Image (cartoon, rainbow, N blue to C red):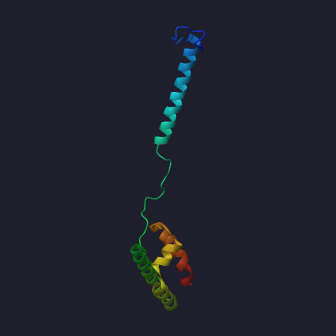
Amino acid sequence: MFNSVNNPFGRKIESALSTGQEKRQNQQEQNKDDEKRYLENDDKDEVQISSTPVLSEEDIVYLTKNYIEKLKNENEDKPKVLEKLDKFLSKFDAKKFMKRNPDITTSDFYMVMYNEVAGLLN
């Protein structure tokens, strides 16, 4: 606020107004910095709906075989449906299935498999 012309002794001279304003300004900057650090360190607001792990190729093959076997047991009296299910199981490729359905979980698997096999049961 004062320069060397007004202050011939080279000492720092501050008025009461300037120190009060500087203190408030410093406090506001401190609060902003604290808030910024808090927000940076705060956990991300991500919610995981399902904690079910992603299925591996072996899991998909195992679940597919079990699913088809259950359908065969339910449709024992329908030979055409049994043939279609056997044909589906013999042509099933787990790698292609995983490419079409990446990061699939168990619950997702049953929904997708139901949609793929539903046409075979008629």
| Residue 13, quarter of picture | top right
Q: Where is residue 105 in the image (x, y as percent from the top left)?
A: 46, 66
Up-down relation of residue 33 to residue 104 (above or below): above
Name the residue located 53 percent from the left edge and 80 percent from the top edge. 117
Q: Observer-nearest residue: 43 or 116?
A: 43
Count the numbered circles shown: 0
Q: Where is residue 94 in the image (x, y as percent from the top left)?
A: 46, 78
Up-down relation of residue 52 to residue 70 (above or below): above
Quarter of the picture holding the N terminus: top right
Name the residue located 55 percent from the left edge and 19 percent from the top edge. 22
Name the residue located 54 percent from the left edge and 84 percent from the top edge. 120
Q: Where is residue 92 in the image (x, y as percent from the top left)?
A: 47, 82
Q: Position of residue 20 (x, y in %)?
A: 55, 15
Up-down relation of residue 62 to residue 44 (above or below): below
Name the residue located 48 percent from the left edge and 71 percent from the top edge. 109
Q: In the rendered view, does 3 fall on the left or right side of 96? A: right
Quarter of the picture holding the C terminus: bottom right
Q: Observer-nearest residue: 101 or 29?
A: 29
Up-down relation of residue 122 to residue 7 (above or below): below
Q: Observer-nearest residue: 19 or 1?
A: 1
Q: Observer-nearest residue: 11 or 107?
A: 11
